[in-house]
Image (tube, helix red, strand yellow):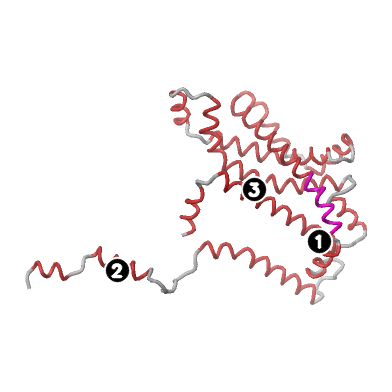
Amino acid sequence: MSTRHKASATPSPEKGSEARSTASVRPGAPRRAARPGVLASAAAPVTVVALVCIWQLVCSLGLVPSFLLPSPVAVVQALVGDWQLLAGHAVTSLAEAALGLGAGIALGFGAAVVMDRFELVYRAFYPLVVLTQTIPTVAIAPLLVLWFGYGMLPKVVLIVVSTFFPITVGLLDGFRSVDPDVIDLMRSMGASRAQIMRHAKLPASLPHFFSGLKISAAYAIVGAVIAEWLGGFSGLGVYMTRVRSAYAFDKMFAVILLISALSLVLMRVVEVVRRAAMPWERPERARRDR
């Protein structure tokens, strides 16, 4: 056999690799391993279910008295039994959280823009912004109730104090993460400060902003409940103080469960808004999940 015939009879490495790749993805072929994204998404629900089962088992065996730790079944029964009352209080807390979070976002955005624009303002006020987070909210709440009464205003002010810090810091980090060469290039092309902010700094700050917004969304519900502990006429915090005085710990756990669920819902809403505002992240996330 000639050399030419031998070369044609011998399969090339490229063709062999193509054949193997085609065979590996042929229809009906079993997958060797599950996708990491599927395992990661299933890990949290499985963990929660396992913890609830352990909790129910501990209560069923009588290892802990029921007046100290009610069972999950008793907590769900209390949640269903007082649902109408809890829903009315939840509306008040959500309204306070929405107003405080909106005001915190506006204040944090304005503060971040001003401190990014003026270095003197940044050096003068950034330490004060950090200082506001060193004071416990439980210590501020009685003063706000004393100053502004028992209405909605002190709750909103406390939520603003709790939420504007993550927004401000996140936006500042995003503004300052822009490559200076990009800003110099835009200035050399005649771009104004507003155009640099719109086309360079704002897109770069969106990941930092939404990360801070997730934290602020969770703080908003918690801040509303803490403020309602110390004074108010309705709200989940007011409901908690009443059932605590009655030693109804099943209802206490029920309202805690509701507060956690509301915080998770708000964080999920932030994630949905993030995906809508940052569509360029979808291809990158799809590549990571492969």
Identify which residue is drawn at 79% across, 76% down: 60
Above or below for 84 versus 106 = below
Question: Where residue 50 sits: x, y (%)?
Answer: 67, 70
Above or below for 5 versus 148 = below
User: Which disc is residue 254 wearing?
Assistant: 1
Q: Is residue 185 left or right of residue 245?
A: left
Badge 2 amino acid: Ala
Q: Which element is circle 1 on?
A: helix
> Counting residues from the N terminus, which is met first, the one under dot 1 or under dot 2?
2
> Counting residues from the N terminus, which is met first, the one under dot 3 or under dot 2?
2
In which quadrant is the N terminus drawn? Answer: bottom left
> Counting residues from the N terminus, which is met first, the one under dot 1 or under dot 3?
1
Q: Is residue 5 left or right of residue 38?
A: left
Q: Badge 1 local density, few (<14 within 10 Å), some, or many (20+)?
A: many
Of the pair 112 and 189, the residue shown nearer to us: 189
Badge 3 amino acid: Val
Question: Where residue 95 sits: x, y (%)?
Answer: 78, 45
Of the pair 119 and 76, the residue shown nearer to us: 76
Q: Residue furthest bottom?
A: 61
Residue range of the region highlighted in magenta in the rendering = 84-95
Q: Badge 2 local density, few (<14 within 10 Å), some, or many (20+)?
A: few
Q: Which element is circle 2 on?
A: helix
Give the residue number, with chain letter if any, for mark 2: 19
Give the residue number, with chain letter if any, for mark 3: 270
3D distance between C-alphas at marks 3 and 2: 46 Å
3D distance between C-alphas at marks 1 and 2: 59 Å
Q: Badge 3 local density, few (<14 within 10 Å), some, or many (20+)?
A: some
Question: Where residue 138 sits: x, y (%)?
Answer: 81, 44
Identify which residue is drawn at 76% across, 48% down: 221
Total numbered labels placed on residues in the image: 3
